[in-house]
Image (tube, rainbow, N blue to C red):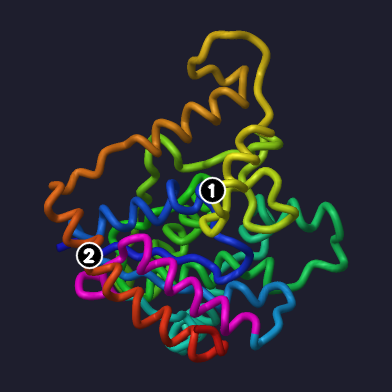
Amino acid sequence: MKRIFSGAQPTGNFHIGNYLGALRNWVELQHEYESLFCIVNLHAITLPQDPKGLTAKTRDLARVYLAAGIDPKVSIVFVQSDVPEHAELAWILNCVTRISELERMTQFKEKAAKQREGVGAGILNYPVLMAADILLYQTDLVPVGHDQKQHLELTRDLAERFNRDYGETFRVPDPFIPKVGAKIQSLSEPTKKMSKSGNGVGSIFLLDDADTVRRKFKRAVTDSGTEIRFDEQRPAITTHARRRARARARDRAPHARRREVAARTRRRALPLRRRRSATYGRS
């Protein structure tokens, strides 16, 4: 069976774009592949973090994984910093990575353009740690969004270079990018990606209540015209159509199995809620 690996940072608030573009795909893929889903907390410290806050967010993200349908009986769910080999391999790969390759990464260029002297080395080396995450587990397939595709291409380059220079060591992974919903745009700025941070006006967070969700959709930016269709020249209506297409996509699993998974998720969530209530003194 082929192996997949993917992960998410325990920062900001998870939104519907994260669910439709990533988590939902993971839930489907875990029954087709040997699956490893990581909470990549080492990536989070490229920016200053409160240690206690990061620990709490790491636990919360684990709960989100389970609530979304990741089954720990089927998939491996773990925290990146618990496996020191991630950082160790990142250093080895740094030694075969060219500075010019890292400086070409879009995310680094965007941040460097705003404040070149203030950008930490972690931002520059972020893609190498991502490559280590993937290559460490001899991954076949990586579910990624469009914004991470460039990083995966670097991962493939590093694997091929290392194999060429030191002998066959790493499996060269392929990307999995869904045709619809891989990139969910902001409700307030349709040309920009929905964000986990900021004021949240353009994002539908997974923990938003029903009234907040309705209010955000009512305030969403739309295009002129009356026809509803996919049109790249009309980014707002196209964004809404893509969200709807992904939201209505049918689970390929039979109804009976979906009900069984939902029941198991509720049973798993109950002790988590009880432990969290005990920790924070809530009933």
Q: Secondary structure at mark 1?
A: helix
Question: Residue 158: where, in percent of width, then height?
Answer: 46, 64
- Which residue has dot 1 on it? 210
Furthest residue toward top = 226
Residue type (three-letter) at the residue carrying disc 1: Ala
Residue 263 — which label?
A: 2
Res. 167 in view: no
Q: Nearer the viewer, residue 225 or 233?
A: 225
Work out whether 241 lies above or below 100: above
Left or right, 260 with respect to 202, comes to: left
**Residue 117, image quadrant:** bottom right
Q: Nearer the viewer, residue 30 or 198?
A: 198
Going 66% across and 50% down the picture, which residue do you hit? 106
Question: Residue 165: where, in percent of width, then height?
Answer: 41, 71
Q: What stretch of residues is rendered in magenta? A: 53-76
Q: Nearer the viewer, residue 84 or 269?
A: 269
